[in-house]
Image (cartoon, rainbow, N blue to C red):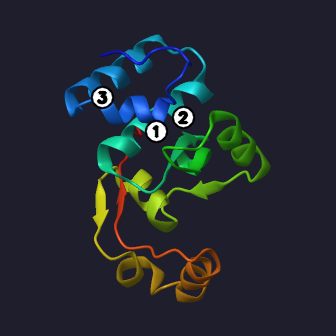
Amino acid sequence: MAIKPAGSIPRRQQLDLLDEGELFMELIRDVANELDIDVLCHKILVNVGVLTSADRGSLFLARGPREHRYLIAKLFDVTVDTELEDAVRKAKAEEIHIPFGVGIAGMVAQSKQLINIKDAYQAYCSIKSDSCRSHDLTYEYVTVDLITVVAVR
């Protein structure tokens, strides 16, 4: 069941109707056919969000020379309901650069190893407890599980 062009059913609802195999095929079609990098990154985040039942996701691209590599947020804090235009606008308004080796995403990029954190407060936020906890209190959000996957060469 391929996703139909914009019409009466929103994309999120269309994705919810797909089984896991169909969702993977939709993602493969998107990667193979989409030429606009913003659209492709957004589709990847939405599809992976549906597949993993994630609250939100971010996609970072590696940049810079080998000795000074860093990540730049292509799209971040994207939910399965976030519209492409909103995600792109937010990413451009708040340019995020993370040096390799800094923070969870930077550590994953440097080590090229998957990290699956079961308790973000205990593993990382305890180091920066004020910023993590104040963010969660401000937005009434609790950070618990966190998975970070690398796709860096």
Residue identified by numbered label 1: 46
Q: Position of residue 85 (x, y in %)?
A: 70, 35
Foreground residue, 133 or 150? 133
Mark on residue 42? 2
Amino acid type indicated by mark 1: Val
Disc 3 on helix, strand or loop? Answer: helix
Residue 1 appears in which quarter of the rendering? top left
Evaluate if marks 2 and 1 touch, with contact meaning CB atoms under 8 Å apart.
yes
Q: Name the N-terminal-most of marks 3 and 1.
A: 3
Give neighbour class at mark 3: few <14, some 14-19, many 20+ (Cα, 10 Å): many
**Mark 2 belongs to which amino acid?**
His
Exactly how many numbered labels are in the figure?
A: 3
Residue 90 position (above or below residue 147)? above
Q: Which residue is drawn at 41% across and 81% down?
A: 121
Type of the residue with mark 3 = Leu
> Which disc, if any, is residue 23?
3
At 35% from the left and 36% from the top, the residue drawn is: 16
